[in-house]
Image (spheres, grey):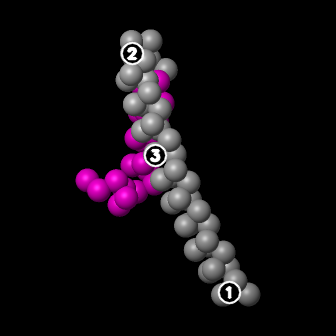
């Protein structure tokens, strides 16, 4: 699945999974770094989706006034 086309909910779930891997006591340093990198990527995607939604809402609100 193309990660750019993931829904907010799917991206958030991936972020939560990366976070859980980081908290695991069985995670090696290398795996923790990979999970951190993934988490940052998914965090940015979530932020982008939310920013786009906010802009759409602002546009719609301005059109109604």
Asked if residue 3 is positioned above or below residue 52 in the image, the reply reads above
Residue count near mark 3 (Cα–Cα under 10 Å), binned few <14, some 14–19, many ≥20:
many
Percent x, y for residue 61?
67, 79
Q: Earlier in the sequence, mark 1 or mark 3?
A: 3
Percent x, y for residue 10?
39, 49
Percent x, y for residue 50?
56, 59
Residue position marked by numbered label 2 in the rendering = 28
Residue position marked by numbered label 3 in the rendering = 42
Callout 3–callout 2 Cβ contact below 8 Å: no
Indicate yes or no whether the magenta region holds residue 13.
Answer: yes
Asked if residue 46 is positioned above or below residue 57 in the image, the reply reads above
Task: Classify the position of the C terminus by image quarter.
Answer: bottom right
Using residue 56 as the reference point, say whether residue 20 is left or right of it.
left
Indicate yes or no whether the magenta region holds residue 12.
Answer: yes
Which mark is nearer the camera, 3 or 2?
2
- Element under label 1? helix
- Element under label 3? helix
Residue at 66%, 87% in the rendered image:
63
Camera-side residue of 36 and 62: 36
- Element under label 2? loop
Residue count near mark 2 (Cα–Cα under 10 Å), binned few <14, some 14–19, many ≥20:
few
Q: Which mark is residue 64?
A: 1
Q: For residue 32, which quarter of the picture?
A: top left
Residue at 48%, 53% in the rendered image:
45
Q: Which mark is residue 4?
A: none
């Amino acid at each position: 699945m193309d990660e750019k086309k993931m829904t907010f909910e799917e991206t958030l779930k991936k972020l939560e999974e990366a976070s859980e891997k980081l908290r695991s006591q069985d995670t090696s340093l290398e795996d923790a770094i990979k999970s951190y990198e993934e988490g940052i990527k998914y965090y940015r995607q979530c932020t982008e989706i939310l920013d786009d939604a906010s802009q759409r809402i602002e546009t719609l609100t301005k059109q109604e006034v």
